[in-house]
C-alpha cells in the first residue's frame, strides 16, 4: 500500500520515490517530532519540510536568511498549485498586511520570513492568530557563531516556542560541523530531536587542487577538456567582468554575475545560463543560492574561499544529476597568504566601528533614543563615498554592529518602483490647470492604478512610457519633478540592502562593543581560513576524505579520483627496492623527531618526488600517520 508521503510526493511533485534519507526525515516531521536534517547541497532539503507540511493541517512558517531562496521556493510551490508567499523588506505595509491576513485566514500553506522580520511585533501578533502546523528553519547553521554565516536574529527564533507551544520544528542545513549541530539543537531548544545526517561524500564529484600561477591557461584547458556548463567563482566584482571578457576572447561563451548588477541583468544572465545559451557564468559568491541546474560539469574557483563551508557549498553545485563533475581550485603561490591577510583585515577595531556608527546615525538623521523598526533601503557605496570610508571596511563595521544587535542589515533586495498620490480632488485639479505639461502623466497614472491615493502602488515605468508615447528618461524626469512638488511620492526601483534599528539607538558614547566579541570573531574567521589553507596545502589525504572529516564524518573511503588519490596511485607503481630504501630513511627521520611532510620530502641527497611517493605509500599502509597538527609520526599500537 502506498504511503501518505509518497502520495503527496506524486501528487504535487510528480516523483515516484524519495532520495536516500528524505522519507525517514519526512516521517519524523509528519509525526510531530522535532528534527534536524543535514543534507549536502543538492540533497533535496526543501522536500523534507514541504512534503510533511502538506500532510499536516495549518500553515508552515519557513525561516530563511536569503530573499533569493524565498522567491525561488515560493515560485516553485505556486507552479505546483500550492499557495505560498514571502514577507520581505521590499514590500509595503499594505502588502505585508494582505499576506499575513491570507496566512491567518487559511488561504496560505507556506509563509516565508527572514529571522529579522520575525522579530517584528506586527509579525508576532499575527502569528499568534494563525493555525501553524510546522516551523522550518532553513540554513540553520546561521544560528551558530561557529557557523560560516552567523545571523544574530536566528538566536531569537526559539521565542516561537512560547507563542506556538507544541508546534514541531525542523532545522535544515547543508554545511554544519558537529559543534554547529550541537549549537542548533540548544539554540532552537529542540526537544529530543531526531537527527538525520546523509553522508557528505559525493562519489560523482571529483575534487582537484592545482598550484597554478597562469590561471587563465589552466582554466581554458579545464573548460575545453571537460565541456558542458560550468561556474567560475572569483573574489571580486571587477574580476567577474574581466574573466568573462577573457573567456569570450578565447571563444568560450561567458557572462559575469555579481551583486552590483541590476536585478534584470542578473536574471537575464541566470536564465541564459540555465537554458544553455551561455556555457559559463563567472560569479562572486552572490551566485548559486536557489539555482537548481543539474547538469553543471565543472565548478572552478580562481580565488581561495574563506571557509570550507563556503567552498563545499559552492563546489557542490556541480554534478547534481549524479554524473561526473569536477570541482577545481586553482591556487597561486601567494593566494593562501592573501586570503589570511584579507580576513584579518575584515574585523575593524572599536574606534573604526564607532566612527562608522556615528556617521550612519547622521546619515539617517536618527536621534539618540529613536529607532527604525521598518527596514529602509540603504546605499552602502554612496554612504561610504559620502564619508570617505573604504566600502569593504564599512561593510564589515556594519556587520559587527549587527553582531552586537545594534542594527540589522539585510541582503540586497530588488524593490520595484512605487508611487502614491499626495494631492487629490480639487487640489490635484488645480495643479493640472496651472501645470498642463504634467496632465498626460497624471491621467495615465490615475487610469492605470487603483488605490493610488491610499497606498504606494507598484508601477512599471516601461508600460507607462509606452502609453505616453515618451521615453523612460522623460518619464523619470517628470516623476522626480512631481515628487519635488509634493504632488506624489516616487520611489524608483533599486537593488539595495535594507537597514533598521530594531532597538532604541544608543548615542555613540553609550555604544558598547565587547573587545572579546571582536577578537573572538577574528579568531573564528582565521580558524576557518586555516582549514581552507590546510585543504589547499594538503597532498597526502584524499580531498573528499578531508572535506567530509571537517563535517564530522570519520569512516569515509578514499575517492580514488582526486589529485591526491591519483598521485598515490602513481606512487604505488614506484620501484620496490627503491621504495624500501627510502622507507627506511623516512622512518629513521621520523623516529628522530616529529617532522612535517614538507620537511620529510626535502631530505638532502634524495629525490623529493620519490620521497613524496614513498611517504604516500607509508601513510596509506599505516606505517606512518599524518596528525592533525600536520606532523608525521608512527601510529600507536592498540
Image (cartoon, rainbow, N blue to C red):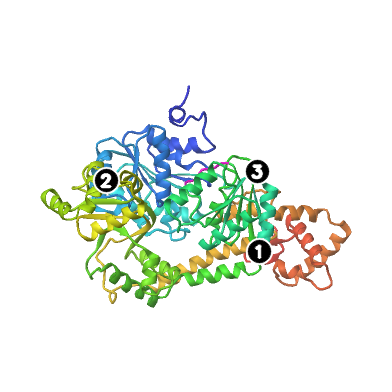
Q: How far from the left and from the top, in percent, is residue 235?
A: 54, 62
Q: Residue at x 66, y 61 (%)?
A: 215
Tell whether 410 sits left or right of 632.
Answer: left
Whether label 3 touches label 1, CB < 8 Å: no
Q: Is residue 340 above or below residue 309?
A: below
Tell whether 64 sits left or right of 570.
Answer: left
**Which callout, 3 or 1, points to the residue nearer the camera?**
3
Q: Residue at x 73, y 70 (%)?
A: 599
Q: Which residue is mark 1?
A: 537
Q: How far from the left and from the top, in percent, is residue 165?
A: 29, 44
> Furthest residue to the right?
577
Magenta span covers which residues?
290-294
Q: How far from the left and from the top, in percent, is residue 227?
A: 66, 46
Q: Which mark is residue 324?
A: 3
Q: CA distance from mark 2 to mark 1?
A: 52 Å
Structural crowding at the residue carrying mark 2, measured as other residues with C-alpha within 10 Å and reported as few (<14), some (14–19) or many (≥20): some
Structural crowding at the residue carrying mark 3, measured as other residues with C-alpha within 10 Å and reported as few (<14), some (14–19) or many (≥20): some
Q: Nearer the viewer, residue 298 or 424?
A: 424
Q: Specify whether residue 385 is painted magenta.
A: no
Quadrant containing the C terminus in the rendered view: bottom right
Q: Residue at x 57, y 62 (%)?
A: 531
Q: CA distance from mark 3 to mark 2?
A: 45 Å
Q: Which residue is mark 2?
A: 95
Q: How far from the left and from the top, in percent, is residue 536?
A: 63, 62
- Examine the rendering and report whether any part of residue 347 can be seen: yes
Amino acid at each position: 500500500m502506498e504511503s501518505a508521503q509518497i502520495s503527496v510526493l506524486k501528487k504535487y511533485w510528480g516523483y515516484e520515490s524519495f532520495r536516500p534519507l528524505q522519507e525517514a526525515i519526512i516521517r519524523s516531521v509528519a509525526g510531530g517530532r522535532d528534527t534536524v536534517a543535514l543534507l549536502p547541497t543538492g540533497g533535496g532539503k526543501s522536500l523534507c519540510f514541504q512534503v510533511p507540511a502538506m500532510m499536516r493541517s495549518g500553515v508552515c512558517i519557513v525561516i530563511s536568511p536569503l530573499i533569493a531562496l524565498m522567491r525561488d521556493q515560493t515560485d516553485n510551490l505556486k507552479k505546483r498549485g500550492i499557495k505560498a508567499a514571502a514577507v520581505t523588506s521590499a514590500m509595503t505595509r499594505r502588502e505585508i498586511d494582505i499576506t499575513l491576513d491570507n496566512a491567518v485566514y487559511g488561504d496560505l500553506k507556506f509563509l516565508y520570513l527572514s529571522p529579522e522580520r520575525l522579530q517584528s511585533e506586527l509579525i508576532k501578533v499575527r502569528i499568534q492568530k494563525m493555525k501553524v502546523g510546522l516551523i522550518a528553519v532553513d540554513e540553520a547553521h546561521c544560528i551558530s557563531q561557529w557557523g560560516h554565516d552567523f545571523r544574530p536574529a536566528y538566536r531569537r527564533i526559539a521565542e516561537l516556542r512560547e507563542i506556538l507551544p507544541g508546534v514541531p520544528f525542523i532545522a535544515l542545513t547543508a554545511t554544519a560541523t558537529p559543534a554547529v549541530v550541537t549549537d542548533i539543537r540548544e539554540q532552537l531548544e529542540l526537544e529530543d530531536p531526531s537527527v538525520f545526517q546523509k553522508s557528505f561524500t559525493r562519489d560523482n564529484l571529483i575534487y582537484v587542487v592545482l598550484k597554478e600561477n597562469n590561471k587563465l591557461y589552466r582554466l581554458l584547458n579545464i573548460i575545453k577538456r571537460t565541456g558542458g556548463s560550468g561556474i567560475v567563482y572569483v573574489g571580486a566584482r571587477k574580476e567577474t567582468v574581466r574573466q568573462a571578457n577573457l573567456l569570450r576572447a578565447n571563444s568560450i561563451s561567458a557572462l559575469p554575475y555579481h551583486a552590483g548588477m541590476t536585478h534584470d541583468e542578473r536574471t537575464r544572465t541566470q536564465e541564459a545560463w540555465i537554458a544553455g545559451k551561455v556555457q559559463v557564468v563567472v560569479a562572486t559568491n552572490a551566485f548559486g543560492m536557489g539555482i537548481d541546474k543539474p547538469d553543471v560539469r565543472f565548478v572552478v574557483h580562481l580565488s581561495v574561499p574563506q571557509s570550507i563551508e563556503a567552498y563545499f557549498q559552492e563546489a557542490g553545485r556541480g554534478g547534481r544529476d549524479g554524473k561526473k563533475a569536477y570541482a577545481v581550485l586553482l591556487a597561486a603561490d601567494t593566494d593562501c597568504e592573501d586570503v589570511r591577510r584579507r580576513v584579518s583585515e575584515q574585523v575593524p577595531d572599536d574606534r573604526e566601528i564607532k566612527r562608522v556608527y556615528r556617521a550612519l546615525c547622521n546619515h539617517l538623521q536618527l536621534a539618540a533614543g529613536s529607532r527604525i523598526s521598518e527596514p529602509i533601503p540603504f546605499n552602502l557605496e554612496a554612504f561610504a563615498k559620502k564619508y570617505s570610508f573604504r566600502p569593504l571596511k564599512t561593510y564589515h563595521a556594519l556587520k559587527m554592529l549587527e553582531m552586537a544587535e545594534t542594527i540589522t542589515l539585510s541582503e540586497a533586495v530588488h524593490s520595484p518602483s512605487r508611487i502614491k498620490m499626495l494631492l487629490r480632488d480639487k487640489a490635484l485639479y488645480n495643479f493640472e490647470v496651472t501645470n498642463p505639461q504634467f496632465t498626460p502623466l497624471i491621467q495615465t497614472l490615475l487610469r492605470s492604478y487603483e488605490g493610488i491615493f491610499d497606498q504606494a502602488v507598484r508601477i512599471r515605468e516601461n508600460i507607462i512610457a509606452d502609453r505616453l508615447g515618451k521615453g523612460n528618461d522623460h518619464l523619470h524626469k517628470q516623476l522626480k519633478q512631481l515628487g519635488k512638488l509634493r504632488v506624489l511620492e516616487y520611489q524608483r526601483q533599486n537593488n539595495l540592502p535594507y537597514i533598521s534599528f530594531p532597538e532604541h539607538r544608543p548615542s555613540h558614547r553609550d555604544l558598547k562593543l565587547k573587545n572579546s566579541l571582536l577578537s573572538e570573531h577574528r579568531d573564528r574567521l582565521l580558524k576557518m581560513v586555516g582549514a581552507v589553507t590546510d585543504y589547499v596545502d594538503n597532498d597526502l589525504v584524499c580531498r573528499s576524505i578531508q572535506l567530509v572529516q571537517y563535517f564530522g564524518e570519520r569512516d569515509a573511503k578514499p575517492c580514488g579520483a582526486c589529485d591526491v588519490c591519483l598521485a598515490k596511485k602513481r606512487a604505488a607503481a614506484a620501484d620496490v627496492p627503491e621504495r624500501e630504501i627510502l622507507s627506511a630513511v623516512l622512518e629513521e627521520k621520523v623516529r628522530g623527531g616529529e617532522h612535517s611532510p614538507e620537511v620529510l620530502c626535502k631530505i638532502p641527497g634524495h629525490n623529493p618526488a620519490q620521497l613524496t611517493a614513498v611517504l604516500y605509500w607509508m601513510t596509506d599502509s599505516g606505517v606512518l600517520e599524518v596528525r592533525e597538527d600536520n606532523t608525521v609520526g608512527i601510529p600507536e599500537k592498540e
